[in-house]
Image (cartoon, helix red, strand yellow):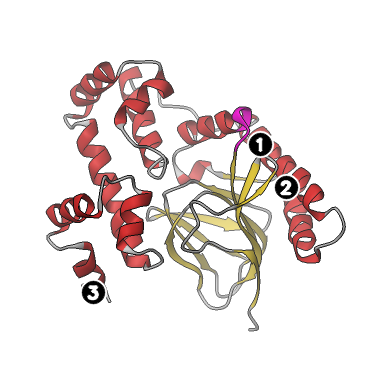
Amino acid sequence: MKEEIFVNYHLDNNFISHPICYGKVRLYQIGRLHAKGTVASDSHVQKAFELTIVRDGAGVISTNNQPTKVSRGDIYLSYPCEIHKIESDIERPLKYDFFAFDADDEKIKNQFERIMLEYGTPDKRVFSDERINYLVGNAISEIQSNSLFSEELLENLFLQILIYVVRSFRSCDTYNFSDRVTDAETLCYRLMNYIDTHMYSMKKLEELEGVTGYSYGYLSALYKKTTSNTLADYYRNKKLELAKHLVIERKLKISEIAEVLNYSSVYAFSKAFKNKFGVSPEGYRCDFF
C-alpha cells in the first residue's frame, strides 16, 4: 500500500515556543495521513490539543495506554501532556487528518479547560461533526496553497473549528459522575486531571487555587484525606513520568526537558530523575537505546 502523508507544520524541538499564530489560535501541526501497516503514529507525548479526524478505515487510539476504537466519521480529542499512539486496522487502513492547536482567546480557553475536567477518560472524547471534518480538510488545502489572503482565511477556519469542538462537547450528555462518587472525590479527580494536562505551563501547585476557588491548604488537606496521598507527590511523580517519555523521544536535549517542565535547573531535574528511576536522564536515554 502506498503511504501518503502531508505535514504542513509539524512539531520540532521548539514546539513549545514556536507555534504559528493565526489570530487567537496557535497552530502546532496539521496534515493528512494514510496509514501504512498497523502503526499509524508511534507513541509520543502530546504537546497541545489535537483532533484526529478519521476519514476512512478503522483503528485504535491509545491515550496513556487506554485504547479507544475509532472508525470512519469519528473525531478524537487529545489533551496536552498525554501519551498518544494510533494503530490502524489491517483490513481497513486508517486515513485521517490531524490538527494540533491551542487558543489564546480567554473564553475559548476556559471552555477547553472545562472539557478537560469533565471529559477526562478517553472513551468520552469521541464525537462526530461533519462541519469540523470539512473545515479541517479545507484548512489543509488552504495552508498548502499559499494563496492571496490565506492567513486571514486560515485564522477564521481555525477559530470556527475550535468553536464547533466546544459546541459538540457542550451538547453531549454522556458524561456524568457516578452517584456514588462524593463531592470530595470529584474535586480530587479534577485536581489530578488539571495537573495531568498542564505539565508544561504549571509552575507550582498553588495555581490550583485559581482553578478551583479554594485555598491550597484546603485542597492539600482534602486530597490527603480522600486519597491517602499528597498532591505534591502526585505532581512530582506525574512530572517525572512525562520527563521519562520526553527523554525516550529524543526530540529535546536534557536541558530543554528541564526547562519545559519548569525545573529550576538541569541539576535539579537530573537529581529528581535519578531519585525516581535510579539513573540519570542521560543514562536512561543511553540504556533505553
Disc 2 residue type? Ile
User: Dot 1 corresponds to which residue?
Assistant: 168
Are the residues flagged by discs 2 and 1 in contact, CB closer than 8 Å?
yes
Q: Residue drawn 40% across and 34% down? A: 194
Q: Residue drawn 12% across and 53% down? A: 275
Q: CA distance from mark 2 to mark 1?
A: 10 Å
Q: Quadrant of the N terminus?
A: bottom right
Q: In x, y percent, where is residue 93? A: 61, 72
Is residue 106 inside the magenta stretch? yes
Earlier residue among tags 3 and 1: 1
Q: Residues within 10 Å of mark 3 (few under 14, many from 20)?
A: few
Earlier residue among tags 2 and 3: 2
In the current view of this chain or complex, which residue is farthest to the right?
Answer: 148
Q: Is residue 269 depicted above or below 32 in this figure?
A: above
Residue 186 visible in rendering: no
Q: In x, y percent, where is residue 273? A: 19, 55
Q: Nearer the viewer, residue 21 or 97?
A: 21
Q: Is residue 62 depicted above or below 284 in this figure?
A: above
Disc 1 residue type? Ser
* Mark 1, secondary structure of its residue: helix
Residue range (magenta): 104-108
User: Dot 2 corresponds to which residue?
Assistant: 132
